[in-house]
Image (cartoon, rainbow, N blue to C red):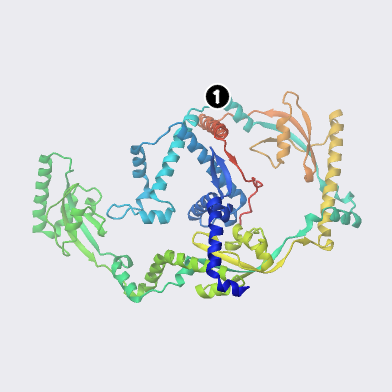
Amino acid sequence: MFDFFRKYNKIVMIFLFLLIIPSFVLFGVERYQGSGGEVKVARVDGQNITRPEWDAQHRLETDRIRQQSPNVDPTLLESDVMRYATLERMVRDRVLAAAAAKSNVTISEERLSRIFAQDTGLAAFRTPDGKFDRESFQRVTGRTPEQYEASMRAELATQQMLLGITGTAFAPPALAAATINAFYDRREIQVARFSPESFASKVTVSDADVEAYYKAHTAQFQAPEQASIEYLVLDLEAAKKNISVNEADLKTYYEQNTARFGTKEERRASHILITAPASAPAADRAKAKAKAEQLLAEVKKAPATFADVARKNSQDPGSAEKGGDLDFVTRGAMVKPFEDALFALKKGDISDVVETEFGYHIIRLADIKPAVVPPFEQVRATIENEVRSQQATQEFAKAAETFTDAVYQQPDSLKPAAEKLKLTVQTASNVSRTPPPGAAGVLANRNFLNALFAADSLDRKQNTEAIEVGSNQLAAGRVTQYTPAHPMPLAEVKDKIRAQLITERAAVMAKAEGEAKLAAWTAKADGATFGAPVTVSRREAQAQPLAVIDAALRADASKLPALVGVDLGTQGYAVVRVTKVVPRTPSAPEQTQQENAQVGQSVAAAEEVAYYNLLKERFKAEILVPKPAETLPMAR
């Protein structure tokens, strides 16, 4: 059979060509590629947001957060809650952009130019000759200038549109007073607590009870799945190691940046200033110049009197009393005509009259500290590190491609990739699917852990693909040993179960006792025993549980004293006696004004939310992925 294919391979290829090409024409390439990469995660005004767009935006946001807060826990950034928050912001931006477009809200070129001119961040991307460094901007921000401009236009347009809502919101004095008073409302209360600890000695838990609870709640006592792994990390530091630096290049770099590695020449100057602003009339400037020339003649005749002449005649208040002394200065510290004259003098020389925008100067060079340039060998390590850093980004891109190919092409081991890129294979044990509190680096990255615990990785013990775990950071790993989740033996958890049953049953007894006392004291107040009176509010809990505060504030203030019962769950039960309402101490006028402003801001925020919800309905905005539980991983 194989001889047939070898003999007639051209005929077979033509047959396959005629068979396959029509199917591409009829059904399209997409049907063969699949649509997994274009999974829709949200929709706004008929336009889809895809998972790749979501992933890209989340990477941008997390990179920005890492740059601003390098010590942030990566577990928080990669959590499902944070990723979903990114998607919600994307939907909000799309909704507001659609509303701005439909309302014909536009931003003028003049306004945009003014904002760009005032943006100090953009100034960092201008070269010394004033040109905009497009490549540097794109490398740092991850966006082209055109994309940045478009995002600024969209942001300003939505701000302008929302200002019509938030800018007109206000809180009437009655609303502000009601809101603030509810927050500061105070009650005088007495509390009788019935805690489970008081009833624990009366609780009996048998071995049969413990065993029955264990069997009914086995899922609560599961040992989590764990794995021992090997992994590699490729980052900029690792990429630097693979950069070969030529000695001649280092010396060229040294020569081109000599001034940076040493100290500049410093000159100690003294001067006499006769002020004459550039805006002064010509006659006044001529008079000032004549005065300066007169003083110049005096100090030329007697140079030793320069300091005395400066004290008596200089109109520079900062230096006149010091005999004109300006201390040591370097190039760039003074206005250019002054600097040019100063650095043209020899030690002890006195200049001619020098004109600047401030007036007329007579300059004396008192001393010179020559520039100090360290020898090449002394700064060689610094230069090499700088050169490597400059080349690291480009080298990382090459290394990343090699890394990705190596872990894929030889899936049973990480050693080939490690040897090619001079990386160290690291190991970790007791790794779980969810990063524990205190986890750091790669082992705290949710995407990396998900790849490790994917079915393919666990079943075949093969390398994961290269995973982006941070800015300019890739990782790949493989599971060497895996222990699935399993029930913990009863012997290991029986003490925990016994303590839990005692607490639960003691809490039930405490509640029953508290409810009985509440009924008895409500019928007859005599014999009721409460703690000392305390004044509580939402701001001043006085060590009382929040449930006690809420119950006290909900009690009918027109029927005091009042008794209320509060179920505190595993903390027992409380009977609260509300004795009186304690008026709030009047605030100072400034504080009242600030409080009213805060209420106004809250009203504006509420109106903005309501308006946004209206826009979501109008533009049929919906998120197509489930919302995760509202919990974040514990920060370390």
Residue 430 lies, in percent from the top left, at 68, 66
Residue 289, above or below 255:
above
Residue 84 lies, in percent from the top left, at 59, 47
Q: Work out which quarter of the rendered image holds the N terminus and state it.
A: bottom right
Residue at 45% from the left image edge and 72% from the top image edge: 242
Residue 536, above or below 307:
above
Residue at 85% from the left image edge and 32% from the top image edge: 521
- Tell me if residue 424 can be seen: no
Residue 486 lies, in percent from the top left, at 77, 61
Could you say which is closer to the camera, residue 128 or residue 550? 128
Looking at the image, residue 399 sits to the left or right of residue 218; the answer is: left
Looking at the image, residue 329 sits to the left or right of residue 88; the answer is: left
Q: Amino acid at mark 1?
A: Pro
Could you say which is closer to the camera, residue 279 or residue 119? 119
Residue 361 lies, in percent from the top left, at 16, 51
* Badge 1 density bin: few <14, some 14–19, many ≥20, Cα 10 Å: few
Residue at 50% from the left image edge and 31% from the top image edge: 166
Q: Secondary structure at mark 1?
A: helix
Q: Which residue is mark 1?
A: 173
Residue at 60% from the left image edge and 75% from the top image edge: 3
Residue 466, above or below 515:
below
Could you say which is closer to the camera, residue 94 or residue 230? 94
Residue 405, above or below 88:
below
Looking at the image, residue 318 sits to the left or right of residue 437; the answer is: left
